[in-house]
Amino acid sequence: MRVYHADLHGEYGRLDGTLTTGPNGVYEVRTIRPGSYGYAAHVHFVVTRGSTKSYLQLLFADDVRKREPEAKQFPVLPDSLQRLWKAPNHGLHTEEVRPVVIGPDGVHRVERDLQLR
C-alpha cells in the first residue's frame, strides 16, 4: 500500500511511503496533518492487489474547505505524480470523509478499515 499527502505548504513529494500490512492485515500510518493546496486536506492511499490498484482519498470531517466538484476529483493522483509513477488508470477510485478524534494527548486520529475482496 502506498500512502502520501501534501506537506503543511500543500506540496507533494516529501510525505510519501509504502507499507505492508501485518499478519492480520493491520496497518497504522503516523504522520502530520496534511496541508492543503486549495482543495480540502486529504491523504491518498493506493492499494495494490495483483495488477489492480485501488485509489482512496481520505478527507477529514472537520475540514470545511470547499471540495472540488465530483467530475474533477479523479484521477486521485495529481497529474505530475500520475506521469512520474506511471500508475494504470484502472481499479477503484473513491473518496471518503472520516471523523477526526482528538485524544487527551492532543493527537488527531482517524480510523479507516480497508477491505479487499
Image (cartoon, grey):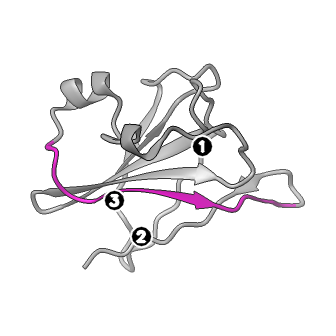
Seen from the viewer's position, the closer of residues 49 and 30 is: 49
For disc 2, the marked residue is 114
Q: Is residue 65 left or right of residue 94?
A: right
Q: Is residue 18 magenta?
A: no
Instruction: Tell which residue pokes out farthest to the left in this image.
Output: 51
Instruction: Tell which residue pokes out farthest to the right in this image.
Output: 104
Q: Which residues are magenta?
A: 88-103
Amino acid at dot 3: Thr
Amino acid at dot 1: Thr
**Where does the N terminus fall, quadrant-wise?**
bottom left
Residue 67, position in %: x, y?
Answer: 57, 40
For disc 1, the marked residue is 31
- Judged from the image, the secondary structure of the residue bearing numbered disc 1 is loop
Residue 91, position in %: x, y?
Answer: 20, 57
For disc 3, the marked residue is 20
Callout count: 3
Residue 46, position in %: x, y?
Answer: 32, 51
The quarter of the displayed image where residue 99 is located: bottom right
Q: Is residue 110 above or below residue 90?
A: below
Badge 1 density bin: few <14, some 14–19, many ≥20, Cα 10 Å: few
